[in-house]
């Protein structure tokens, strides 16, 4: 084996300025040998011949095990690593069924259009006789959709199109649904949180409609490795599911490097805090070095803007050395027009592009073969996503590959690069979803009733008693009408268009160039106030624009082309009130609670920053407030305990707001270690005297209506969560607080006040009580006044 990963790492390190030591840990992961097995006897010769002609001389063990479960009629999830050939595990039974029974049909669902398009190309490229595979998604021309309904026997789609295009019009899909034999749910580990809850109910609706026409399809799920895949799949489907987890595919060795950008002494950030070189700037330089070495590389960046900036930075570096190489670097992200995405996907697959800075849009997308290196700029929120991204490297058996994890200025990233075992040895997370969330359940019951009348028997699949309670409430509000044979939808208009399964809050906001009228892209409505407010810098295909006007009612953001030397970061204010306490643990002077809260937030301005991180100025905005009813975990601390905090006289009242604020920010940053979430999925508020609790309080809340299970995970893991939070603050080398420990990139108060030492003191006090003494757990439904709280 060629140790190319180590060679590439040495090349990247050679470009590090003298005196800097960004590398915190390096680990070489050994290769894994292949475990081939014979083709199963039940597979028809034409299917096997087509796969052999493609180059699959023998399948791997896990592929045949999963395919055989599916062929025998058992729902199955194959949970093995990236590039382990999970596609064959469902292609084999589906192609066999379509070959044996010309009238059989199958449905493939993927979370992204890129992945669906890639899998469709793979199936059509096999050329199996009688297989009429076709795409049915938002990019499918209207003229082709009738042909797909009438003739296709394997339809490639996504949950969005199933929800909006197939189920509400199921009478037009009778031919397809009546003979539906298989449903493939690809990359099912992505269906978590609120989106996962929506998809879980959507799949229950699909099974119900298919059964109405006499079909009972077998579900085949594919996933990157997840904790307890059988339980996760069962939560998603609502039926028992077999799990195949032992990976029989070969894997090349990988050199994994953890990388922390250095602090920059010459620059200051907010409130004089030290600034660390940004992960994006560091990744640009690393990507440029890799391209100079001729290494095919992907850089995963956390945001759309970040992907554009990283690609621009790499191209700028390369243009000074070899302008031709600069043209072989590009950005890839959501929000591009379909034709732009397809062209980029082809260039990535062919190797025409050597370096690509991408959001997670390519984490699950095109089947890219032969990558030499992957750079992960910032922890992607879950270990499952991290290993999915890392797994894009090392796809050939005889060449070691490189994976570099570049830490952002963030408490979690800082913790991970200094605690390698938390990344490299920790098992991946369990999928968190809650189909019983009433904010999710009610709209799906409305859709289900509009598709077919709901019956008491059918409610069992939607949660039984919980679903019945929601249906009875909808009936009382005359949303549904009860008749002897079930509940009926009362309106002439179907509810499907008003149900946004991805939780973005409605129709996309369209970004339009004012001078030309050209549509540049789209932004989720829930993110519009943060991303395309007036004055915001918007990047598209390497070109920068400045927003002139955001019209939320019309769903339009008007922009003009401009190349400012600064970027923008929105700032918001936030209030929180307790609606109901669900669980409570009482200690001596500390109370830990889980409950429902109402969060009111408003974007009030934005910062303009130079690429170095230096703040230019702050600009005010007047945008409407947004209200969110969700779940939160919070703890209260008595004034007496705060006064006895370590450090002499304890925390004097003047220090308490900054201390709580620091503890809150760090807790938000570390919760993703214990819940399957991203710090942008959650938020927080801290106050020295909350009107609902009467004490100093720190809240961390889910960022989705009704909650997504994240606060619940924090409540159940409160001690290890707060221990890791304290460790992350105390271990940071900065003197008074920085983005690596207690500053937050989305703080509405401009990270003021913040007291790093005070944050450690607060956590010491809380852990000193919570960690050492037994506690009472009380379950209740105690209503509280819904008065607003304010953060000092």
Image (spheres, rainbow, N blue to C red):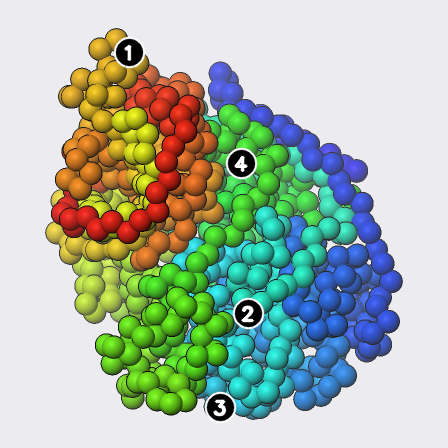
**Count of numbered tags:** 4
Q: Which mark is residue 405?
A: 4
Q: Nearer the viewer, residue 192 or 767?
A: 767
Give how far apart the Cα atoms at labels 1 and 3 are: 72 Å
Report helix, strand or loop for mark 3. helix
Tag 2 near tag 1, CB within 8 Å:
no
In this rendering, the answer to whether 220 lies above or below 778 is below
Mark 3, residue position: 172
Mark 1, residue position: 647
Of mark 1 and mark 3, the one earlier in the sequence is: 3
Give how far apart the Cα atoms at labels 2 and 3 are: 19 Å
10 Å crowding of disc 1: few (<14), some (14-19), many (20+): few
Report helix, strand or loop for mark 4. strand
Instruction: Give the side of residue 481 with respect to residue 244, left or right.
Output: left
Residue at x 19%, y 63% (from the top left corner): 551
10 Å crowding of disc 3: few (<14), some (14-19), many (20+): some
User: For residue 778, what is the image quadrant?
Assistant: top left
Give how far apart the Cα atoms at labels 4 and 1 are: 37 Å
């Amino acid at each position: 084996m060629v140790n190319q990963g180590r060679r590439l790492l040495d090349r990247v390190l050679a470009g590090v300025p003298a005196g800097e030591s960004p590398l915190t840990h390096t680990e070489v992961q050994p290769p894994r040998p292949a475990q081939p097995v014979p083709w199963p006897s039940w597979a028809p010769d034409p299917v096997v011949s087509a796969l052999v002609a493609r180059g699959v001389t023998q399948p791997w063990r896990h592929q045949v095990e999963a395919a055989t479960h599916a062929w025998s009629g058992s729902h199955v999830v194959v949970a093995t690593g990236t590039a382990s050939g999970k596609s064959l595990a469902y292609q084999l039974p589906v192609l066999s069924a379509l070959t044996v029974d010309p009238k059989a049909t199958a449905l493939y669902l993927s979370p992204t259009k890129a992945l669906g398009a890639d899998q469709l190309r793979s199936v059509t490229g096999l050329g199996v006789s009688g297989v009429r595979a076709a795409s049915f998604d938002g990019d499918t021309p209207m003229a082709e959709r009738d042909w797909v309904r009438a003739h296709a026997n394997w339809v490639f789609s996504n949950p969005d199109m199933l929800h909006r295009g197939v189920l509400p019009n199921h009478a037009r899909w009778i031919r397809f649904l009546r003979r539906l034999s298989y449903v493939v749910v690809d990359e099912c580990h992505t269906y978590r949180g609120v989106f996962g809850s929506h998809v879980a109910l959507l799949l229950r609706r699909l099974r119900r409609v298919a059964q109405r026409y006499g079909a009972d399809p077998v579900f085949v799920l594919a996933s990157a490795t997840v904790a307890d895949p059988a339980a996760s799949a069962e939560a998603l489907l609502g039926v028992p599911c077999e799990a195949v987890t032992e990976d029989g595919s070969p894997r090349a060795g990988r050199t994994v490097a953890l990388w922390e950008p250095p602090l920059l002494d010459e620059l200051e950030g907010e409130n004089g805090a030290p600034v660390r070189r940004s992960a994006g700037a560091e990744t640009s330089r690393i990507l440029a070095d890799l391209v100079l070495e001729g290494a095919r590389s992907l850089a995963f960046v956390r945001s759309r803007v970040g992907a554009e900036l990283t690609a621009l930075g790499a191209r700028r570096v390369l243009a000074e050395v070899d302008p031709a190489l600069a043209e072989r670097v590009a950005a890839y992200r959501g929000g591009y027009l379909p034709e732009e995405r397809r062209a980029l996907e082809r260039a990535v697959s062919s190797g025409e592009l050597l370096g690509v800075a991408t959001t997670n849009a390519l984490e699950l997308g095109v089947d890219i073969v032969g990558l030499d290196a992957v750079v992960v700029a910032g922890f992607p929120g879950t270990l499952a996503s991290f290993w999915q991204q890392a797994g894009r490297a090392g796809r050939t058996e005889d060449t070691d590959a490189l994976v570099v994890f570049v830490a952002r200025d963030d408490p979690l990233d800082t913790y991970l690069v200094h605690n390698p075992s938390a990344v490299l040895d920790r098992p991946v997370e369990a999928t968190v979803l809650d189909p019983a969330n009433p904010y999710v359940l009610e709209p799906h019951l409305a859709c289900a009733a509009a598709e077919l009348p709901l019956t008491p028997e059918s409610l069992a699949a939607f949660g039984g008693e919980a679903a019945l309670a929601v249906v009875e409430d909808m009936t009382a509000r005359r949303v549904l009408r009860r008749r002897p044979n079930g509940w009926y939808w009362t309106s002439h208009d179907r509810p499907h268009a008003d149900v946004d399964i991805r939780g973005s809050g409605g129709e996309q906001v369209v970004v339009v160039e004012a001078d030309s009228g050209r549509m540049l892209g789209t932004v989720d409505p829930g993110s519009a106030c943060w991303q395309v407010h007036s004055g915001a810098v918007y990047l598209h295909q390497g070109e920068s624009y400045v927003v002139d006007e955001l019209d939320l009612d019309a769903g339009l953001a008007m922009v003009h082309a401009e190349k400012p030397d600064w970027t923008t970061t929105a700032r918001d204010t936030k209030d929180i009130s307790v609606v109901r306490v669900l669980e409570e643990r009482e200690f001596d002077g500390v109370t830990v609670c889980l409950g429902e809260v109402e969060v009111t937030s408003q974007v009030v301005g934005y910062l303009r920053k130079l690429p170095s991180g230096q703040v230019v100025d702050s600009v005010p905005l007047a945008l409407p407030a947004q209200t969110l009813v969700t779940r939160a975990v919070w703890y209260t601390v008595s004034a007496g305990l705060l006064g006895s905090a370590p450090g002499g006289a304890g925390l004097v009242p003047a220090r308490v707001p900054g201390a709580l604020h620091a503890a809150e920010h760090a807790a938000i940053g570390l919760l993703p270690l214990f819940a399957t979430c991203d710090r942008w999925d959650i938020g927080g508020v801290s106050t020295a005297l909350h009107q609902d609790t009467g004490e100093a309080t720190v809240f961390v809340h889910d960022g989705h209506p009704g909650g997504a299970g994240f606060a619940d995970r924090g409540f159940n893991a409160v001690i290890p969560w707060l221990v890791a939070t304290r460790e992350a603050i105390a271990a940071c080398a900065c003197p008074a607080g920085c983005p690596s420990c207690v500053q937050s990139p989305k703080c509405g108060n401009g990270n003021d006040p913040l007291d790093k030492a005070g944050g450690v003191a607060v956590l010491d006090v809380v852990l000193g009580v919570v960690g050492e003494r037994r506690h009472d757990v009380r379950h209740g439904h105690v209503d509280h006044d819904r008065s607003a709280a304010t953060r000092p």
